[in-house]
Amino acid sequence: MKDIHITNFSEEDWEKIKAIYREGMKTGYSTLETEVPTWENWEKNQIKESVIFI
């Protein structure tokens, strides 16, 4: 079994996170957004303590 690391993510991780977010959007169930936000818009609209990257 691989180790699992949980951490807050930063702008350096955005390209990976954006790809995952886009895949979720395709399902039609993950968000009400119609476009993937920019890093700046994403960051200002998130509660920092609740956004993690596994």
Image: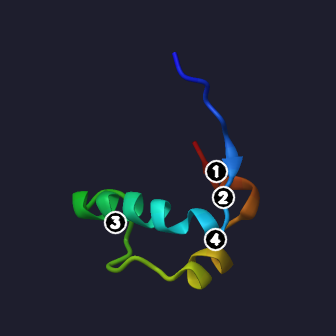
- Is residue 41 toward the left or the right of residue 49 in the image? left
Within 10 Å of disc 4 (Cα), the crowding (few <14, some 14-19, many 20+) is few
Q: Nearer the viewer, mark 2 or mark 1?
A: 2
Residue 13 percent across, percent down from the top left: 58, 62
State the separation of the CA atoms marked 3 and 1.
17 Å
Q: Secondary structure at mark 3?
A: helix
Q: Residues within 10 Å of mark 3 (few under 14, many from 20)?
A: some
Q: Tell me what residue is drawn at x 35 percent, y 80 percent.
A: 35
Q: Earlier in the sequence, mark 2 or mark 1?
A: 2
**What mark, if any, has residue 52 been given in the picture?**
1
- In space, the residues marked 3 and 2 are separated at their CA atoms by 17 Å
Q: Which residue is mark 3?
A: 22
Which is nearer the N-term, disc 3 or disc 1? 3
Dot 1 alpha-carbon crowd within 10 angstroms: few under 14, some 14 to 19, many 20 or more: few
Report how far apart the C-alphas of labels 3 and 4 lie in the structure: 16 Å
Of helix, strand and loop, which one carries label 4?
Answer: helix
Q: Quadrant of residue 2?
A: top right
* Vertical side of 28 occupied by 5: above or below: above
Labels 3, 4: front one = 4
Amino acid type, callout 1? Ile
Residue 9: % across, % down = 66, 58
* Residue 40: % across, % down: 61, 84
Question: Which numbered dot is residue 9?
Answer: 2
Disc with the residue nearer the chain's start (3 vs 4): 4
Q: Nearer the viewer, residue 46 or 11?
A: 11
Can you identify the residue that label 4 sits on?
11
Nearest the camera: 5 or 25?
Answer: 5
- Of callouts 4 and 1, which one flags the residue occurring earlier in the amino acid sequence? 4
Calculate the distance from the C-alpha at mark 2 to the C-alpha at mark 1: 6 Å
Instruction: Please tell me how many numbered marks the rendered image carries.
Output: 4
The answer to whether the residue labelled 2 contacts the one labelled 1, judged by CB atoms less than 8 Å apart, is: yes
| Quarter holding residue 22 | bottom left
